[in-house]
Amino acid sequence: MTTDISELTSPQVSLVASYRALGGVSGWDECLAPDGNLRAPWRSFFDHVGQLSVPDLIARDTKLDARVVELGLAHDIFSDPNDDEPGWDVNLIPLIFGADEWVGLSAAIEQRLRLADALVADLYGPKVSLRQRHLPADIVLSDPNFLRACEGIQPPSGHVHFLAADIARRADGSWALIDTHTETLAGLGYALANRLVYTHAAEDAFSATPAVRLAPFFRDMAASFAVAGEQGDTPRVALLTPGPTHADYFSHAYIARYLNVLLVEGGDMRTVSDRLYLKTLEGLKPIDLLIRCVEGLKSDAMELDPGGFDGPVGLVQACRKQPDLVRNSLGSAVVQNRAIGAYLPEVCRTLLGEELLMSDTPRRWLGGTDPVAALQGVGPGAVIRRVQDGTGRPGENEPGVHFDELDAAQQQDLIAQWRFNGASYVAEAPIQLSHAPTFVAGHMTSEPIVVRLFAAMTETGPKVMPGGLAITVGKENQVGQDAVRGRTRDVWVLGDNQNPLAHQSLWRTTTEKARVQRSQRSLQSRVADDLFWLGRYAERADWTMRVLRSSLSRELGDDGQLRTDGEAQATLEPARRAMTLLLSKPVAPSQPVVFDADRDSLRRLADILIHDRRGLHALASTLDLVVRSSELTRDRLSLEAWHVLASLRANKPWRRMLDTASPAVLVDLLEDGLAIIGSFNGLMHENMTRNHGWTFLAMGRRLERAYNLSDIMLALFKEPESIELDRSSMVFLLEVADSYITYRSRYRLDPLFPFVLDLLLLDESNPRSLVFQLDRIGSHLETLPLAQMATGRTEEQRLVLDATTRLQLVDAVDIASGGTRDAFRALLEAQLEFIPEVSSGIARRYFSLLEEKPHRVFTRRFAGL
Amino acid sequence: MRYQVVHDTIYDYSTPVVQSRHVIRKSPRDLPHQAIETHSLTITPRPTIIDRHTDPFGNAIAFAEIDTEHRKLVVSAKSRIETRPSLNIDLDKSYAWDGLRKAMGTAKTCEIDVVQYAVASRHTPLTNDVMAYAAPSFPVGRPVLQAAWDLTSRIYHDFKFDPTATDVSTPVHDVLQHRRGVCQDFSHVALACLRMMRVPARYVSGYLLTHPPPGQPRLQGADASHAWISVWAPETGWVEFDPTNNQIPGEEHIAIAYGRDFDDINPISGILLGGNEHTVSVAVDVMPLV
């Protein structure tokens, strides 16, 4: 049951009262005591929000949703583009912990961090816990995440530097730990982003509740990365992510940016002589510390999973030489194994000499000789779960199987399978989860939650982040964070009120530590490559839309009347040629479809060009490529720029309208599309630092524009045509090349071929002219690191210089006059050859460090007899 | 007996290899029944870096990184080895296989070096068909070594040696289905069956002395590397069985390395940049010294 708060007159009473009116929830209520009064930690929060009017509350809630979308939190590169349901939701009502309770919780999680570290050190070292039978050896030995190759690697700074723990509150108010994450940062970026989203949307509520800020925790974490760089250099710290296709990429990119470390993928690195390097535009640069957000098993194809290229080949051997290189250490996932939980009290006593402060929910391993007895040991309601799963993305655990809900035959099947795969499963006692108040669409409701807390090893010992991520769990009696659609809430910890903390944020680096640095950070070759193609695709989409717009608007004359047949033919022919040209790439179809230059044919051509995905210039696929490249380079683009391009996504209104648009509105939609690309270009021009990344983006755009311009000019003016057609082609070209107004203001004449050629080929002040593109490409090439290191000009520089010079020597009047167009044709054909050469020259020089993927060789044991 | 063993692996690449790194396990182990008198490992082209250490299973590993461009790689291991005959073991006097687990579980300390070989590995998954094949060799109460002997002998009779039937990654499931393969496949089948019964058993890579047909001279390089298994019993420790030849290995088997399966002790694995297609040839020469 829910209560509509807008029906109630006094909002202050109503929020709490409507929650109370829901009636008692099963299990513990986070917010209300059994007597129906607010629990102490929640009072300030409700005192404040209670003063807000209902529209105010809804406004804040709407703002929260909007910020989630703006930040890209909800965004998933692989999500179904037609699925509009938000993938992430931050509730207006946080989960609030009082200072007293937090002391106990944080002590328990700190202890877990120390325990995980000690256990990993033991398992990859002396194995006392196994040898003395504190922990059944089979659990560890049968876990593929126990990486034998990493035995003996003992980092002096410790194995486990960060840990996340999923905890749930039982009906009696005590906490149980249901999952430990020691492999990756496990969604730390989401917790941080949630806090930022919340304080943007409802700063007043946060400030009114004296909750502790997160920045000091992250500052301590960042300080712990300050390892010594080679020869006193600034240490190069990188966060290793599986890449933009991974569900957790947002979190990785976000936290890397916040902590000011590089974001790298396996292919960005290479080991040479047992040392780890980053491939950059300037060559190989040593990496001093790698924050690992990829699975250990997939971190080194050489010695671990042969198919795992999430890390650089040779990483294990590099760690043997430099044990502190990777955090958490390779193989740390083994202590996530759920079957270990039952043995932790004893392991804790042995390794730490302490009593375990928070135990795991009761659980038994099914890999022993008698799995049925293990199952019965857990009691009724047991849930069967894998010993290891999930990526650490909050809410993304595989749901367990409720054994009691299976029929007898299914139960027998499952039991029979345990004989073979029992080592991969545990039976777990479910917890009746606690409930927390939730604000949904103007209503109060109550949802069962699980809380993820984060801890990190700092220079002053283990610290727990004073906050966290609470997730609404799908089914009331479910275990683990197998949540539906990321319904989350921020976690607030109340300060002790004595010494309110000053506002701190890492976004503004404190000046006492940082020196002013203008030199650019090294740019990964991969990122340069992706930005280059983003530039090309964005320009390609722009060009195709220009051609479409000009073609479709030709249907009608200036007076809105249909033209006479002869006129119409000359008017429509350039459009036919331009669209046919775009459709013919990369190669003309084997059975060329010949279109007439009439209105229906033009519409059909436009239709194919927009919707058919075949061909290099097909609009739908080009737009998808723009979006895709922007995903790949997301951590290099400003939020605004990324946002602008996101509106080109297939599931966004503009694309949907484009899909179904009638010819009447198509021109308007194309205008809108051009405005989107235009504002992206503007943002890049105004807001992006002129670093190497920008250079590659700009070069991509210039090369694409130079090619398209040369291509269309050749197609339209290959041979002299009738005066009407030539004139019409020139108008069309000037429109497409966005130079019509310039032309008219300059000449106040109908287009004349020599003047048009001058403006579009040779005019160095026209940003749409060919010579302008070449000139800019030339200056961009000069700024690149390898060009600066080279003694003479590089191959690409020579090519560009040659092409530019040839163009500059041309006399427009000469080339335009005479009966044939031979000189003109030769000039543009040379351009069309040279542009791809420059493009591949750049690729060879700057992206070649992205060499083919390494592959494995084997020998086989053959013989016998 | 004393031997000189030469083991050459030669890779020919269709395009130049720019950088390569290799893990090499071609150094025979020093064991109670096997003494290594001399051993050398030669790699051409000369590696930029070579590094040696011992893996968690006690085998010697060499890491080599080659940064010079090359189209051919030669890894040559040369050893002088003395082997002793295996002790006479009474297979019938070992612990019952079905009591083994309990005996191991109640010992005061857990012997990792033994129990690590009792759990499934990548190449020895536990499945229904493994269970079905293993069952006849494991009646209640049978001594574990006798069961192992029965199992390996059944494999010898049931499976046909056929180098064309399988490759380096053929799963045990397929081998069981087609009943064909090479020593590596037979060893994996035997190991999966033993581990299905939770008996510790390990994979052995090594060499086997081959005998030329009567009246013909020994051909150099005609020998081959070989694989067999080793099974643990409390009374005897590790005892070896050769399912490919239906033998208990003795003086004519020379062990290089022990592991859970082939993956752990692949003699050479490598990661290359460049190289494209490659052909590999292996020449093994086991020469008895008198």
Image (cartoon, rainbow, N blue to C red):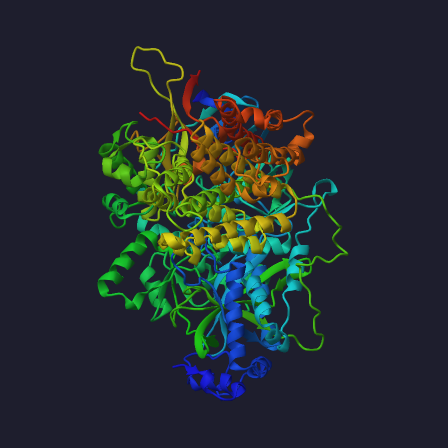
Residue plotted at (47% across, 87% down) = A8
Total numbered labels: 0
Horizontal and vertical percent position of residue A239 = 58, 49
Horizontal and vertical percent position of residue A813 = 57, 27
- In the rendered view, tell whether residue A156 sits above or below residue A219: above
Horizontal and vertical percent position of residue A35 = 49, 89
- In the rendered view, tell whether residue B206 sits above or below residue A91: above
In the image, A81 versus A582, the foreground residue is A582
Residue plotted at (34% across, 70% down) = A381
Residue A248 visible (yes or no): no
In the image, A760 versus A541, the foreground residue is A760
Left or right: residue A425 compared with residue B135 = right
Q: Residue furthest right?
A: A512
Looking at the rendering, in which quadrant would you find the N terminus of chain A? bottom left
In the image, A415 versus A594, the foreground residue is A594
- In the rendered view, tell whether residue A18 sits above or below residue A781: below
Horizontal and vertical percent position of residue B16 = 50, 23
Residue A426 visible (yes or no): yes
| Quadrant of the rendered image containing residue A377 | bottom left
Residue plotted at (59% across, 68% down) = A200
Looking at the rendering, in which quadrant would you find the C terminus of chain A? top left
